[in-house]
Amino acid sequence: MYNMITIAWRTIKQLVRDRRTIALILIVPLVIASLIGVSVPDKTILNYTLPAILATLILFFGFLLSGISFLRERYQGTRERLMASPVSRLDIICGYLLGFLLFAMAQTLILFFYTVYVLKVDFKGDLWQIVLFQVLIGILAVCLGIFISAFARNEFQMIQFIPLIIVPQVFICGVLFPVEQLPGYLQWIARFLPLTYGVDGIRALMLEGKSLLGIGREIGVLSGYAVALMIFAGISLRRGIA
Amino acid sequence: MPESALLIKSLVFNYGKLRVIDNISLEVPAGISFGLLGSNGAGKTTLIRLMVGLLKPAGGSIHCLGHPPSPAVARNTGYMPQLPALYNELTVEENIDFFARIYGLRDGRLRSARVEEVLRLIELWRKRKTPVSQLSGGMKQRVSLGCAVVHQPRLLFLDEPTAGLDPDLRMSFWEYFNSLTEKGATLIISSHTMDDAARCRRLAFLKEGKVIAQGSPAELKAATGRADISLEDAFLYYIRHTRAKENV
């Protein structure tokens, strides 16, 4: 636990020192949310689409932030140095997860409160339950970013994973169109993609007013994905050292 | 302390189909500086990465301080990679403090005292609040060394620690290395410069993943059978001698 917190604290300090990145982390979600608010004038469509877009943006920002940061650690040699130290792989993965999650959640909360209080998107469920579910999507996003970074050798390659990993989920997972309206084979694929459960869960919370207990399946699947990705990320830590 | 600080038997490592470490055996007694000397691509860095447990061997065994590489053993070893491998956004002090923490110095007072001692030792006390990104290459090397020694390891792996340093700084690094061995620490130093090699108590010459000769600098020179030979010429002698044997 001590090593985990030490790594998390160091990750936070590093990111905080990069003031331009911090400014972008805080401003970009507001710009995107404003654009969505302006470009979707119909309140009914906005109410239906925005929770799904929220889930997508959490996944996107978390993936990008953790993926790029973790990749940088690899080519700077700091991850290798860390792996030669007494810290365990679990300490490393969970330490980074905690550190990155803070920033991913800052972005998420800015987005959420901006959409709710500035764009006046209607929602039903408990605020804390919605935020808790967003934390789960954030954890998944960070784990996904750490895992995928093992397969990229530079930032350019990491960016190329966005159209491969994130964009298809936007079209298949019910963000823009209901999954039921997609061809059968795409519906089948959607069942295996985490964003489907993120979108279903957040819509159930925000539009139907369900509680976390009412979306147990979505929470279970997303947690399973997060744990599996964390294990894969731990295994993939050695990649790139050679 | 075990008799041998480092014991390697029949070590083999491959990158894909390419054999990079080919049946290496070494025994390093405690309390000496041991040099791994070879040209670029000889396998020095790969060998050090195997020793610190970053890579898994395809065959053979490694024992550091009597045990195979593991996180528990790592607590008593230090590693200075070829690149400075520091957190550029953090200050000099924060980098050293971070490594002090993860190597087990948890008592705040003791850690602060040790970090201060290391900062003075590497002569960066006045720069302790400076972000690493603003330091020169030589200063970064000093910080990197500080991070590797802050927990006072018994076995220290240094991958080309003096590469790119000016002669003055190189000399002060060696003065420090010698002070560590005098206190009982064992140093494994990879290098391709004869200046470093001459300062090591014992040496292993590496060529294409194999140890082609090992011994003290004096022994290695004497074994060539030539009087007054320099260490560099002795190294070249072994390289050419090995190549000639391979061509037969």
Image (tube, coloured by chain):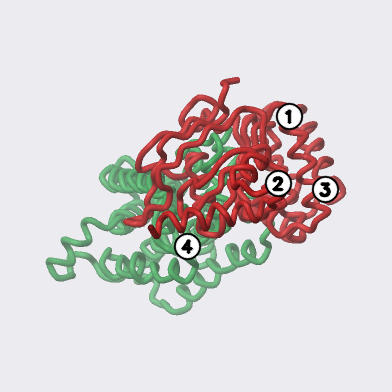
Chain colours: A green, B red
Picture disc at residue B127: none
**Which tag is nearer the camera, tag 1 or tag 2?**
2
How far apart are labels 4 and 2 at the CA level? 49 Å
Res. B116 image quadrant: top right
Determine contact: label 4, label 2, CB under 8 Å.
no
Residue hosting label 4: A64
Per the image, the residue denoted by label 3 is B124
Task: Give the image location of residue B176, x and y in percent.
Answer: 78, 40
Q: Which of the chains bears the disc numbered 1?
A: B
Q: Disc 2 or 3, which lies upstream in sequence? A: 3
Q: Is residue A131 visible?
A: yes
Mark 2 = which residue? B198
Judging by the rendered image, the residue that carries numbered circle 1 is: B108
Using residue A94 as the reference point, say whether residue B14 is left or right of it: left
Kind of residue indicated by mark 3: Leu
Relative to A3, residue A219 above or below: below
Q: Along the horizontal axis of the image, is B134 left or right of A37?
A: right
Label 4 or label 2, whichever lies nearer to me, is 2
Left or right, B218 with respect to A148, comes to: right
Is residue A113 shown to the viewer in this render? no
Q: Are marks 4 and 1 on the same chain?
A: no
